Amino acid sequence: MTALPPLHELYQQHRQRALAVVRRIVKDSDEAEDVVQDVFVRLYTKNVHFDGKAACTTWLHRILVNSSINSLRARKRRGKLETPLGLVEDPEARAVGNERHAMLIEALQHLSEQHRLVVTLRDVRGYSYPDIARMLGLPEGTVKSALNRGRTRLAKVLAQQEPAEDPQPDDVR
């Protein structure tokens, strides 16, 4: 196992390159800053061990790419659950967005506390499985199964909430 240089040196040496790599993937400067900062904080707080099988830069690059992809996935999940109401100018579209949001909030109340917490932390807040496991004091496998069960239950509740489509009258001539 090869030792990493002190974290502050690693950060100073690789920050600009790390930002460039992440920006190319997430295509958002602010999000890139967040991802790079999160990576270096995780390296510091989790006492990550560098095995020396690859160059330090290669190892760091892989971590940055994986974290960037995770950030994109979280953004996509959040996008499915959020309707950018501030951007909607059409009153009808705004009303539909408000209705969807209210339905989601109501549907979440039908989940157990554990399922509601896991779904909210993962799909709304974008936390990783290990982070959720640590926050809730659960094994990672339990988090994954609770998320699956919570999503399944949420989908069933939302399906029951959907208003029935009005039957279209036959074309009368």
Image: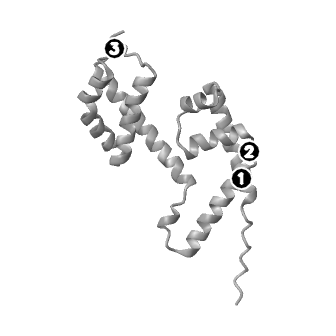
Q: Would residue 27 be visible to someone looking at this image?
A: no
Q: Which residue is drawn at 37% across and 34% down?
A: 65
Q: Where is residue 131 in the image (x, y as percent from the top left)?
A: 54, 31
Q: Return the residue nearer the eye: 157 or 112.
A: 112
Q: Is residue 82 left or right of residue 17?
A: right
In the image, what residue occupies the spot 32% across and 29% down?
61
Question: Label 2 amino acid?
Answer: Leu
Question: Does residue 10 lie above or below 113 as drawn?
Answer: above
Q: Residue 111 carries which label?
A: 2
Q: Which of marks 1 and 3 is nearer the N terminus?
A: 3
Residue 24: quarter of image: top left
> What's the CA distance linking mark 3 and mark 2?
45 Å
For the point 36% across and 36% down, the residue is 36
* Tag 1–tag 3 contact (CB < 8 Å): no
Q: Pinpoint residue 92: horizontal percent, then vertical percent.
A: 58, 74
Residue nearer the viewer, 79 or 166: 79
Q: Which of marks 3 and 2 is in front?
A: 2
Please give the residue where the numbered disc 1 appears in the rendered image: 107
- Dot 3 alpha-carbon crowd within 10 angstroms: few under 14, some 14 to 19, many 20 or more: few
Residue 118 against residue 124 in the figure, above or below: above
Type of residue at label 3? Answer: Lys
Q: Residue at x 72, y 40 (%)?
A: 113
Picture quarter with the C terminus: bottom right
Asked whether the residues under the numbered discs 2 and 1 touch, taking CB atoms below 8 Å apart as contact, a structural biologist would say: yes
Q: Which of marks 3 and 2 is nearer the N terminus?
A: 3
User: Which residue is disc 3 drawn over?
Assistant: 53
Q: Whole-Å distance between the Cαs marked 2 and 1?
A: 7 Å
